[in-house]
Image (cartoon, grey):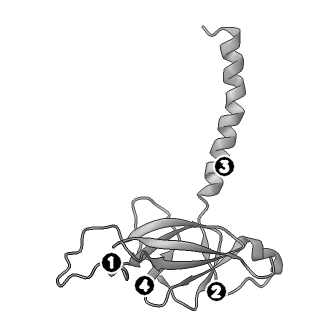
Amino acid sequence: MLDRGTAIAAIVRLPLLAALLALAACASQPGLILAGPPADPTDLPFSAFLRASDADYFWLSTPPQSSHVLEPSDTQVTKQGLWLQQGVFYLEFECYSPKKAPQVAYPILPESADETTLYIKGGRRYLLSCDEYRIGKAVLSDLGPLPGL
């Protein structure tokens, strides 16, 4: 049997737990790949622009609908860039030749993940690049707010 103090503490914690669960659900909202810049200026704070560095290869897709089905990423991120609606995305990349790493005659590529998830926040400009020193690491750089915000 609970005493009065324990019961009150449990009741106070329930709204806090519900609020934390709601925040977690918002943070995992899937993003959307847009056909172009938002037509309505009021959508600009929820949209972002993402481009890739010149010599790196990246593919982007929305997260799979089921944890049991992994679909390949189908939209290549180029240096011309693409527009996104904020949210979570699935990223595949080819980062096998770090530009500033010591060069070896016959490199043995270590096993590394070539996919990850990332969160894109609306109202921002981003640049995707490969880490200059490490194999198998993609870097997402925030270039600042979109013009007009």
- Mark 3 vs mark 4: give the one in front: 4
User: Which amino acid, by three-letter code, is at mark 4?
Assistant: Tyr
Image position of 135 (left or right of 130): left
Between disc 2 and disc 1, whose residue precedes?
2
Label 3 belongs to which residue? Answer: 23
Between disc 1 and disc 4, whose residue precedes?
4
Q: Position of residue 12 (x, y in %)?
A: 72, 26
Label 1 belongs to which residue? Answer: 101
Which residue is at the front of the view, 134 or 128? 134
Label 2 belongs to which residue? Answer: 35
Mark 1, Cα crowd under 10 Å, few <14 / some 14-19 / many 20+, is few
Label 4 belongs to which residue? Answer: 57
Between disc 3 and disc 2, whose residue precedes?
3
- Mark 3 vs mark 2: give the one in front: 3
Q: Are marks 3 and 4 in contact (CB under 8 Å)?
A: no
Q: Say if residue 64 shows up in the picture.
A: no
Q: CA distance from mark 1 to mark 3?
A: 40 Å
Determine whether the residue tagged by mark 2 lies in a helix, strand or loop: loop
Q: Position of residue 130 (x, y in %)?
A: 43, 77
Q: CA distance from mark 1 to mark 4?
A: 18 Å
Taking 42 as reference, is 76 above or below it? below
Image position of 4 (left or right of 62): right
Between disc 4 and disc 2, whose residue precedes?
2
Q: Position of residue 123 (x, y in %)?
A: 72, 73
Which residue is rendered at x = 77% and y = 85% of the image? 39
Q: Are marks 3 and 2 in contact (CB under 8 Å)?
A: no
Q: CA distance from mark 4 to mark 2?
A: 20 Å
